[in-house]
Image (cartoon, rainbow, N blue to C red):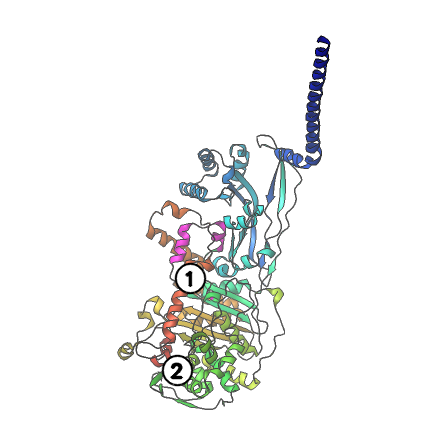
Amino acid sequence: MRVANDVTQAHSFTRRAWLLGAVQGGVGLAIAGRIGWLSLVQHDRFEAMAESNRVNSTLVPPRRGWLIDRHGRPVADNRTDFRVDIVPDRLRDEDRVLDLLRQLLALPPDEMERIRIDLSRAYGFQPVQVAEKLDWDRFAAVGVRLPELPGVEPSRGFARSYPLGAAVAHLTGYVGAATAEQFKATRDPLLVTPGFKLGKDGLERTLDPLLRGKAGAKRDEVTARGKLVQSLATREDVPGRNVRLTIDSGLQEYVARRLGTNSGSAVVLDCWTGEMLAAVSMPAYDPNSFSDGISQLEWQMLSENDHVPLMNKMTQGLYPPGSTVKPMNGLALLRAGVPASDRIFCSGAMRVGTGVFHCHQRRGHGPVDLRTAIAQSCDIYFYEMARRLGYDRFAPVARELGMGRRFDLPFSTQRYGTVPDSAWMRRKYDKRWTVADSLNASIGQGYVLANPIQLAVMAARIASGCAVEPQLLAARVKRDAPALDFEADALQTVRDAMWSVVNGGGTGLAARMNVPGVTLAAKTGTAQVRRITTAERRMGVLKNGQLPFKLRDHALFICFAPANAPRYAAGIVLEHNGHTVRNLDAPMIGRDVMTYLFDRERALRSLADAEPTWGGDVATRMAAAEAAYRAAHGAPPPAAVATKTDAVVPSNAPAVRAATDLANESQEALVGTGPTGNTVAEDGTTEANAEPQ
């Protein structure tokens, strides 16, 4: 029995030893496999992790491409910038860090309040600006104390600069930090790199892929505590492309200043190529301030301004063109076979059916032909011709001259108006086009709407006889525009009539140029925004100066020069100008803009004399308006000093939508019949009030 037990025990021990050895071998193989996996397969990953402990690698925002004018002068460029940001995710001991930054950067209390609010609202990965445009001493002071400032990111780079300021705001737009939504959509680490900004509005937004460039990378060897040991090799950024515009920056600035205190827009074109030499909407905001980051208070101030400085009026504004369409309608009559010498007797009123349609000249103009009708802006002449022919004979010519067109321009928003006719009326309203509709449309009221670019194109096409297309990018300019399908004699007849508007006793005498050898051809216009009641007509129509700003007429002007050899054309719209101040009215602005193109010194002298009477230049008036607003509102609440970081930009601001809705409502109220059953033409136009009071 003992022998058996020994054998059994020996066998049991051997089996346990074998199992233990197998387990040990398995564990050894697993460890060896894991070591092999880590050392071979995962080598690159762990080497990168080890390297990241030793080397701090950060993206370097690329230098943004410049926007330059036709002569190579900067419209948007870059300046060297020292800045400090905080990345909330990396921030530790917030109070201590902010207090140290306050000491190092000499930050005032309101800035500290702004930083705290911005930090509380920011996403963890979204950099919060502490300060920019720092001098070297303060920037270096932060760098020296960086190990004590977790989450603080000092950077040396380039900030966007707009040398012309507000004069180009609605043209260039501006740049700004990416929103949290933009980062979440792409997860592009560049978007949350301190100092990086992308296009937010205007050309900066539409041309962002060209202007942005490619990021570089900076590598620094650091200790475990983050102290710099040495700078390692870096990858240089690839700058964005420069984009040449057709704009003349000198003219752009002059036009912005010459618009004075008006709410309006002006577009200047080369008659033969369609190059936009100036494209201005005023008042505006300072794109430098927007790019740096404006406060909620500043945004509120701009939003409450009744001149709507956030709105790009040259692309988003739509206006009844008023009498500026009369040269265009004259071309339609000549094409239809109406002799230019045919006369219509203007008695001041005209009965059609049960309605009476009035001329702005209440006593009438007497017998008028086409040239006189354009020069004197006679409504009755065009009423009668529209009654005879119907507006369907006018509408095709309007479209040929650019009305109702959406042009291929690099703007994110472009409202393009209406050229109505009987087919349009059936399609949109399921209604029959009436004689009254034709009469209203014949004087640029009713359903007819245009933007300032279209008015400038209309003037350029009449001047050149070519189907020029407006262009803003120099690379897209076409210099071989096809000829329009009009007889040369017809075009010359209309040009001569526009010459008479200014130089032959017409409605635009104030636009006569003082440049030797250069004359201006033009057409004035007035567009109503309110209905005139029978009672008011009986008692005497109120002058524009007696009305609130929003109820005053729009003032419009189209022109080209020289009249005998056209080279430049312009379209000007002044919202609610009402012809109330002579040197701020459309004809004199048009005259001075054209004068600048032929005699710059004369134009600048004229502006220097007038500008002080308007409260100074653009920057001076903007600064005064901001100071007055702040004084009126007292100490702002804490939230008002916070940086505006949402996705709302000027072109889609609530204030712009509200202004657009109000204009649409006013237009709807005017196009139909009023309480007395009258249309605008039956009530009588207000062009008789066009002389400044």
Task: Provide residue 31's location: percent of width, then percent of height.
Answer: 68, 27
Classify 80 as above or below 412: above
Stretch of the chain drawn in magenta: 287-313
Residue ranking furthest to the top: 2
205 and 585: which is toward the camera: 205
User: Which amino acid type is shown beneath numbered disc 2?
Assistant: Ala
Image location (x, y in percent) of residue 42: 68, 35
Quadrant containing the C terminus in the rendered view: bottom left
Above or below residue 129? Residue 438 is below
Position in image of residue 283 (x %, y %): 43, 61
What amino acid type is highlighted by mark number 1? Arg
Q: Secondary structure at mark 2?
A: helix
Is 164 drawn above or below residue 514 in the view shown?
A: above
Q: Residue at x 68, y 24 (%)?
A: 23
Tell which of 81 and 413 is nearer to you. Answer: 413
Q: In the drawing, what numbered circle is on residue 638?
A: none
Is residue 555 in sight in this rendering? yes
Membership of 286 in magenta stretch = no
Q: How many marks?
A: 2
Residue highlighted by disc 2: 436
The residue pinned by badge 1 equals: 657
Distance from label 1 to label 2 (Cα)?
Answer: 31 Å
Q: Foreground residue, 51 or 345?
A: 51
